[in-house]
Image (cartoon, grey):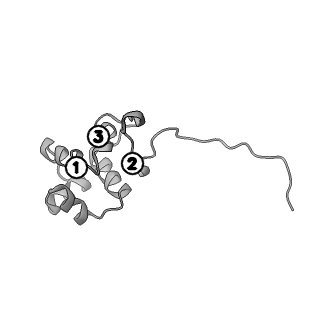
Amino acid sequence: MTLPIHEKLAILRESERLNRRQFSELTGIPYSSMSSYEKGVKDMGIQAVMKILQHPQFNKYTMWFITDQINPESGQIAPALAHFGQGITISPHSEQKTG
């Protein structure tokens, strides 16, 4: 399941527990641009993507952000809020009665 870039951007920021202002200050991308990118109003250019993914705090998400894949062995992970991996987990119910 591929998410649109603007959704990935929001997930990345929220997973790091940053508000838009903090994220903007860390990356050097103007707040108004960042807000437009996240809302999907404006497409991100390669320069903005590079500013984000080259930042030491966010480069661990590069592979996920670009390709929807991860490689934990090389330090490439998905953000905590990305819901990456197995979609449905089935839990067997016990027939045992309690109480």
Residue at mark 3 to residue at mark 1: CA–CA distance: 10 Å
Q: Is residue 35 left or right of residue 64?
A: left
Q: Residue at x 39, y 43 (%)?
A: 78
Q: Earlier in the sequence, mark 2 or mark 3?
A: 3
Q: Of the numbered discs in the image, which one, if any, rests on residue 62? A: 3
Rendered view: 60 above or below 57: above
Which sits earlier in the primary sequence, circle 3 or circle 1?
1
The dot on residue 55 is 1
Q: Are marks 2 and 1 in contact (CB under 8 Å)?
A: no
Going by the numbered disc 2, the residue's amino acid type is Pro
Q: Which residue is mark 2?
A: 79
Residue 56: % across, % down: 25, 49
* Secondary structure at numbered mark 2: loop
Q: Residues within 10 Å of mark 3 (few under 14, many from 20)?
A: many
Q: Are marks 3 and 1 in contact (CB under 8 Å)?
A: no
Taking the image as shown, residue 71 lies to the left or right of residue 35, namely right
Viewer-nearest of labels 3 and 1? 1
Element type at mark 3: helix
Q: CA distance from mark 2 to mark 3?
A: 10 Å
